[in-house]
Image (spheres, helix red, strand yellow):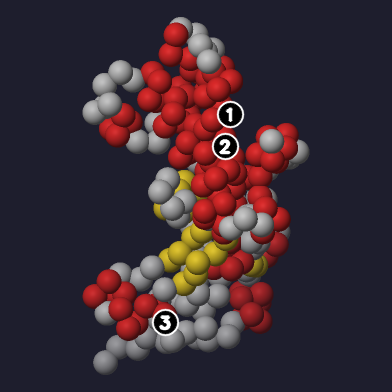
Amino acid sequence: AEALAMIRGWDHELAADSAAAALFEVWWSLHLRPALYRRLVSDPKIIPLLGPGDVAAALDRLEGASGPALADLPSLLLDSLASAFADCEQRMGPDRSAWKWGSLHQALFEHPVGKVKPEHKPAFDVGPFAVGGSDSTAMNGIYRPPDFRLVIGASFRLVVDVGAWDNSVCVNTPGQSGDPRSPHYGDLAPIWAAGDYVPLLYSDKAVDEATVVRIELLPA
């Protein structure tokens, strides 16, 4: 009943701070779709090969449910939703008001050096950051199903004001510097995660006024 109330009261936005969004994604990815595949695929050896499966195909099967395998579709939906609700309690605790999609769906920028030099991870890694969305939303945010870690998304965004170029904005992540000692190594990551932007200046005057550091490379 609590799970149904959360889904019915949801605004269908996969916002990072949404409890219902967390419940829905856990249900859809780890409980409903696997339960659907178990009903439709007779050979259990094939099921692991399906992975997360195709969203459109899964929806087609659910919306056009037919045949003995889906004769009790309401039970399939409710039982898997109950399992997802219990799963969320395990992952995020018993306090429903503290559940957030962004507590599961997170972006972490790991530097390869951390794999061989773990002592450098705190300085080289950037994040994690709570992010909204999924593989079915604008600002595509594909995650790996076991832990919902963001694995594919737009690392660079750009909005250009043609003719008034200095009004353009952009964002990159995690930063513009590849040097972990620089303040600009990871300073864009929280801006990126929040869906915000920084100015993309174009004219010489605007660039000169905003310049903080200039690197000159001279021949020997």
User: CA separation, marks 3 and 1?
Assistant: 46 Å
Q: Quadrant of the C terminus?
A: bottom left
Number of marks in picture: 3
- The single residue placed furthest to the bottom in the displayed view is 220
Q: Quadrant of the N terminus?
A: top right
Q: Dot 2 corresponds to which residue? A: 82
Q: Is residue 148 visible?
A: yes
The residue located at (66%, 57%) in the rendering is 95
Under mark 3, the amino acid is Ala
Circle 1 residues within 10 Å: few <14, some 14–19, many ≥20:
some
Contact between labelled residues 1 and 2, with CB atoms less than 8 Å apart: yes
Q: Dot 3 corresponds to which residue? A: 123
Q: Is residue 49 left or right of residue 147?
A: left
Contact between labelled residues 1 and 3, with CB atoms less than 8 Å apart: no
The residue located at (24%, 28%) in the rendering is 45
The vertical placement of 199 against 53, above or below, is below
